[in-house]
Amino acid sequence: MKFIKNLFNKFNVTKNINLDDQERFVFHKKILENKKMLKSCYSEFYEKILFYEKKFKTNTNDQIRIELGSGIGFIKKIDRNIITSDVVYNKFTDKIIDANKIPYKNNSIDSVFGIFCFHHFKNQLDFLKDIERKLKVGGLCILIEPYYGPLASIVYKNAHSSEYFNKLEEFGHKPKNKNSMYKANQALSYIYFVREKEKINKIFPKLKIVHTSIFNNYLRYFFSGGLNFKKLLPDFLLLFVRCLEFILYPFIKLFGVHQIIVIKKFK
């Protein structure tokens, strides 16, 4: 495991960047714009979010649709009606929104989206309480989070020095001095929505998980280096990598590293 951790560290291009500084947004934006393979992954994330929103949504009038932790994403290029946000000032987003204190009235929000941000929230239970109150009946919370399969477990345990991956962590555990970018357990979506699913159902009777699935873009994500690591393959091999993903689809539960979770509010 030490060899894997050292390998990730060697290819890390953000190890000298302060993740709490505004510099990271500009730095990540440049990385995303220069990685066609990575942009294809994000396009797929947005397409799936909007596909499942359309499939499961109930309300269509007076829509309030919010993306939390938008970072340097480009969901507005696909749907300009979505309100983008981050927990700190970010010139690439519309608003500053704390996921634990979403500034909207009860029963007023149609959709809440979040890509790789649930595990960064300061308090996951407070977030779920808030969306249970703020979502309209029939409203959706759609999250994309780290998956918990064999390969994902190895990767997330070694990739980021600022984060960790512990599927055995106590439910409701709150690391000391946790902020938005540091001390985040990337296994929290597994803990809350798989391991402790029955407990979550009892605590939040109005919220139900109506869909989960694994993304089949893990090779593109790895070979692109994501937002934090160097490219392993040039972008002109994008079509070739897509073909490999298609061939390896039967092994997605072994190799997948990202999942989508769709939560709906019922009466």
Image: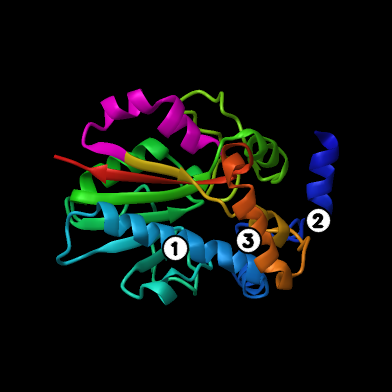
Q: CA distance from mark 2 to mark 1?
A: 27 Å
Mark 2 secondary-structure assignment: helix
Amino acid of disc 2: Phe
Is 79 above or below relative to 221?
Answer: below
User: Can you identify the residue that label 3 sits on?
Assistant: 242
Is 17 above or below relative to 146?
Answer: below
Circle 1 residues within 10 Å: few <14, some 14–19, many ≥20: many
Position of residue 81 measured from the top left corner of the image (x, y, whole percent): 31, 73
**22 or 43, nearer to the observer:** 43
Residue 11 image label:
2
Magenta highlight: main SS: helix
Q: Residue at x 28, y 55 (%)?
A: 55
Is 91 above or below relative to 182?
Answer: below
Residue 21 image label:
none
Position of residue 59 measured from the top left corner of the image (x, y, whole percent): 17, 58
Position of 149 with respect to 204 (left or right) is right
Q: Quadrant of the C terminus?
A: top left
